[in-house]
Amino acid sequence: MLFCDHLSPQEVLEAKQTNREDLLAGLVADFRKTFPDLTFELQLDFSIINAQALRLANQQLVTIYGGLALHPRLGPDGLTFIVLHEVGHHLAEGCRSKRDPSLACECAADYWAVTTGMADLRLRTDRSLRMQVAVEELDAVLSPRQPSKGKYTKTNKSSGCWAGGWPSRRSALLARDRSPQTTGCCISHI
Amino acid sequence: MGSFINSQADNEICEALNKRFSDDVDPSDAQNRTYITVLRDHFQNRENFLDGAHHLNRVFHRLAKSVTGGASVPRNKQSRHRWLALLRGTLPAAVMQAIRNQLTAILTQASAANPAGSVNYVVFSTQHVPTRSGTFELFDQNSPAPQVLTDANQKAYCSVVLQCNVDAPLPDAPNETDPPTADPGETTFAVRRRPQKGGKKARKSVKKSSAKKKKIITKKGKAKKAGKRK
């Protein structure tokens, strides 16, 4: 996270003026209600464009940083998917993350988010996720940062995960592809 | 660390460290031991590379190279310099000491007082969070003992988390010494050999094909000479 992109101070200011914080408070409240065993944190004072799942002591943390939470191109659907994905790192079964075997892999977290996670959230809170809208919002944020062929995917081959490149990840999300059936997915199952 | 948007340099740093402290079998080890077992052996019997005489930027450089087979980490020069500068001097002394203490606990023999000495692997990550000290901290409040956790496969592991209180990119360090200057008393870590491009078979076929080319050239040369004679 030390080398992540940051949102500009101007964009942070604009987002705070548009009642984004109310939207975020509602979102986090719904997630706390649906997944009470997890700890959800909004770190709006950090402008890094990212979110994170982390096991810390006995806590299963999901943190949304200001750069992503206040990003002008993201709306409720994009943000809901992002948080579901991070929850998926903690709760999804299947292949493990190469970087942290205590968490589910990127593709397993994605699949869990658009299936089990989405259903649980709707059942407990009536919050729904329009996946097509979420993907369109995420296009603007992820396309320049996770291209299909380029610096990132070439050197990240050790993680062996298709979810590294946004175009393939995007297709899999819309098709709700189960991770082990996707070519190139890691195969280190529990 | 499951971050939503992967950052190249962060990934490379964490992956190199995670690999070096992993329970994957070290391919360069004749006894087929795991990376962490080989590292514990090196630390306990050959060199205490976490004592005060060793610099953390140099230690990181050596650990990473022993995994990549020679390539420096991160690959991007600017990011690497920023990272090495952080380890050399930007981190507060208390954090540097906590890093030495936690890694020492992991690499020394296990005991009732030191469960970290027997963990199967270590996960390294970073987190942005307000800290009590108002600057960098190693979780938990620069504790000398790393947190020991259990994963879904009931394996014990340690999680080493560098917490960053500052909302700003790491400062550039264009004049950083890269690679860092060697510390006294260094002994070589077992280094995974980088696979040679193509391997032996491919090199043989290259030789064959170049030999064939030579033959063709000499035939052509002979034909030309013969033509000239005509």
Image: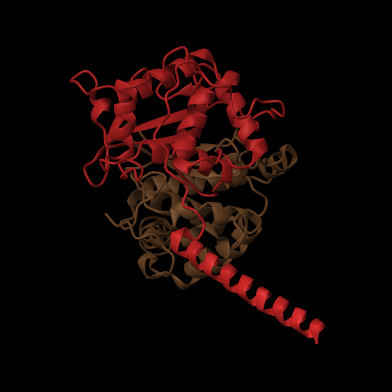
* Residue A16 coordinates in the image, percent (x, y): 66, 41
Can residue B146 be seen by looking at this rendering?
A: no
In the figure, what tint was chain B given?
Answer: red
In which quadrant of the rendered image does the N terminus of chain A lie? top right
Can residue A24 be seen by looking at this rendering?
A: yes
Quadrant position of residue A24? top right
Query: Which residue occupies the foreground of this view, B172 or B42?
Result: B42
Quadrant position of residue A122? bottom left
Image point 49% across, 53% down: which residue? B196
Query: Which residue occupies the foreground of this view, A160 or A110?
Result: A160
Vertical position of residue A170 compared to residue A63: above or below: below
With A6 as the anchor, is A132 left or right in this view? Answer: left
Image point 61% across, 35% down: which residue? B80
Q: Which chain is brown?
A: A
Image point 47% across, 73% down: which residue? A175
With A160 as the anchor, is A21 left or right in this view? Answer: right
* Residue A29 coordinates in the image, percent (x, y): 44, 45
Vertical position of residue B40 compared to residue B155: above or below: above
In which quadrant of the rendered image does the C terminus of chain A lie? bottom left
* Residue B174 coordinates in the image, percent (x, y): 72, 29
Residue furthest out toward the front: B229
Vertical position of residue B151 compared to residue A160: above or below: above
Query: Which residue occupies the foreground of this view, A136 or B219?
Result: B219
Query: Which residue occupies the foreground of this view, B75 or B187?
Result: B187
* Residue B224 coordinates in the image, percent (x, y): 76, 80
Residue furthest out toward the left: B112
